[in-house]
Image: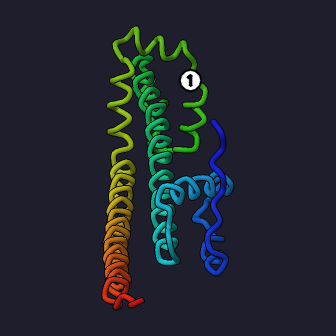
Amino acid sequence: MDPVPLVTPPIELAKFFTDPPLVGIEDREYFYRFFSAIAAAIKPPDAIAWLFTWDVVCLSWEIKRERAVKADIIKSAQGRAAARFLGRIEDIGEKYDLNEDLEQGYKEVRRFTSEHFAKLADNGYGPADILAEAYIIGAADIDAIDRRIASYEARRMTVMRAIEAYNEKFARKLEAARDIVDAEYTDLPTEKA
């Protein structure tokens, strides 16, 4: 797949688009390709539309990030759930109940092998059981992320409605301008020869 060509906003607005909402190791070039793809779809005709486009891109980026974090939380919780189940099977009590010392718990979870998961399966703990337990373990964090995603989505929808309203006003202004132009040309007296 060919990369999306980067868009160039109007030069007088360039300073508004130089500080994307990146955190950690997020890739600036990937962000600007994302921005370019959305801008190419919206085709902002003026400064206001460019600013609206930037808002849609930034909110969409935040949603994308939150979804990635949510997936990581669930994956981590799956390891913790598997460790809990394994602790029950091996009758070693709290050794694998990782709520107390999370950092140590993450180290333990990373040591899980296919043999551990085979042992879990042999004892009736399949992927669905592990996932269900993971959702219980991570419930508070998952709910918090879902609330943030819903907030970002609502804000993005508000911006998209504003774009639609702005475009409708712009379309009405264009229509009025066309009516004026048409009226000027049709109301002019014809020259007599």
Question: At which x and y percent is residue 136?
Answer: 32, 39
Identify whether 176 is placed above or below 40.
below
Identify whether 86 is placed above or below 70.
above
The image quadrant where one finds the N terminus is top right
- At horizontal 49% and vertical 48% (from top left) the residue drawn is 69
* Nearest to the observer: residue 72 or residue 40: 40
In the rendered structure, the answer to whether residue 102 lies left or right of residue 193 reads right
The amino acid type of the residue labelled 1 equals Phe
Question: At which x and y percent is residue 167?
Answer: 36, 71
Q: Quick check: can you spot residue 65?
A: yes
Residue at the top extreme of this rendering: 122
Residue named by callout 1: 112
- At horizontal 47% and vertical 28% (from top left) the residue drawn is 83
In the rendered structure, the answer to whether residue 32 lies left or right of residue 191 reads right
Q: Quick check: can you spot residue 25?
A: no
In the rendered structure, the answer to whether residue 24 lies left or right of residue 71 reads right
- At horizontal 32% and vertical 31% (from top left) the residue drawn is 132
* Nearest to the observer: residue 32 or residue 68: 32
Question: At which x and y percent is residue 63?
Answer: 44, 54
